[in-house]
Amino acid sequence: MKPLADIRIIAVEQYGAGPFGSVHLADLGAEVIKIEEPQSGGDVGRYVPPYNHGEDSLFFETFNRGKRSLSLDLATPAGREVFEDLVRTADAVYSNLRGDVPAKIGITYPQLKHLNPAVVCCSLTGFGMTGPRAKQPGYDYILQGLAGWMELTGEPGGPPTKSGLSLVDYSGGFVAAIALLAGVHAARRDGVGMDCDVSLYDTAIGMLTYPAAWHLNAGFTPARTHHSAHPSLVPFQVFPSADGWIVVGCAKEKFWQRLVQVLDLPALTDPKFATFATRREHADELLSLLDTTFATKPSAEWLALLEPAGVPCGPVNDVAAALRDPHTLARDLVVETEHPYYGTVKQVASPVRVGDEPPAYRRAPRRGEDLGYVAGLLGYDEPRLASLRSAGAFGKTP
């Protein structure tokens, strides 16, 4: 059995952050039953361009593999009835909605505990379910600005810069998955469920980590650094080579000593470069010297010298190079699923690894594909299904 094969999650989710969190739980074996609102066409992620065809998109495949889909109109009494039957069988109800919406549609723990006292209601929202921003929609781009990330990113003097990836969304998904698993563990131990109120805002602020601690305790003002340099360790940044860029990092004194040996420049043995503190004090002079030196050879030549010497380093890859890197392939980080429209779909594997059993992946579900499965799970016979259909539980009937 997969590690989470005994966990059932009812997911009222869509687009990126929420589905990103639950897809890793599905990869670990959790049964994730995805509720899709039929009147709007289900998860908006199904329609994200440029690689989309009808209700199929490579975006949706990325975030929803291994899940099941049920088209269900929670605004109808019949749809609510099916949802409540599912809650009775579930370990968790998981959602990513605006902060005030879970209570409005009745999916918080106080609203569901009469159905299942041990159910865990994990709500990943933009700003949380309390506070002055609770009713605001939260998006990764906005959160990167609000939490100070964009102000910290980019070259000094340049415009505020967003990360190339939606890191608040993805980190928020992981935070929600951790909270859900902790809640389920406690509920199984104690027999009592709970709400898990997690948010993208909390995630983004929490990830300020040590710069926040430095500011709160010592008045430190974070600032952008040239060539993405580390704020305190010198050298630890990107350097231009003759044909691209490389990253070199001396996070320990022994790495600096190895770098000095590889570069074999008398100037680097000056006592003013001997320690972390003095290198930081004379950073402008040192980094100018290193910039000039690294620009004399192509990246591959430098890496061939630095890697065997044990100096932490690496190329600045584009996405294509990262995906074909020998280590990527050796770690089985590109996986395949079969899809009725796309055929063989390649995507990146979950980084979450548990045990020695190789993971198995299943394509994302078509919208409403698992009605039959859910009907069997809940013991609905054909007359019952027909009654629910006519009452609009699964959307309008033709």
Image (tube, rainbow, N blue to C red):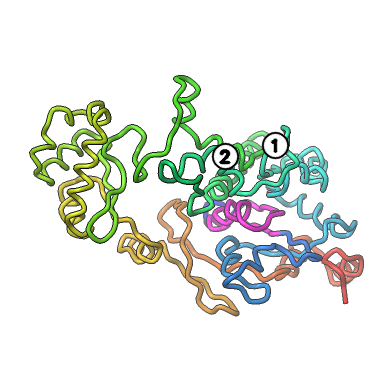
Q: Residue at x 50, y 22 (%)?
A: 216
The quarter of the displayed image where residue 39 is located: bottom right
Q: Which mark is residue 191?
A: 1
Q: Residue at x 41, y 41 (%)?
A: 156
The quarter of the displayed image where residue 356 is located: bottom left
Q: Which mark is residue 203?
A: 2
Q: x and y percent of residue 296 in the render?
A: 17, 55
- SS at mark 1 in the image: loop
For the C terminus, the quadrant is bottom right
Q: Earlier in the sequence, mark 1 or mark 2?
A: 1
Q: Which mark is residue 177?
A: none
Q: Which residue is more in the foreground, 287 or 67?
A: 287
Q: Which residue is more in the foreground, 58 or 23?
A: 58
The quarter of the displayed image where residue 366 is located: bottom right
Q: x and y percent of residue 264 in the render?
A: 9, 44
Q: Which residue is more in the foreground, 160 or 99?
A: 160
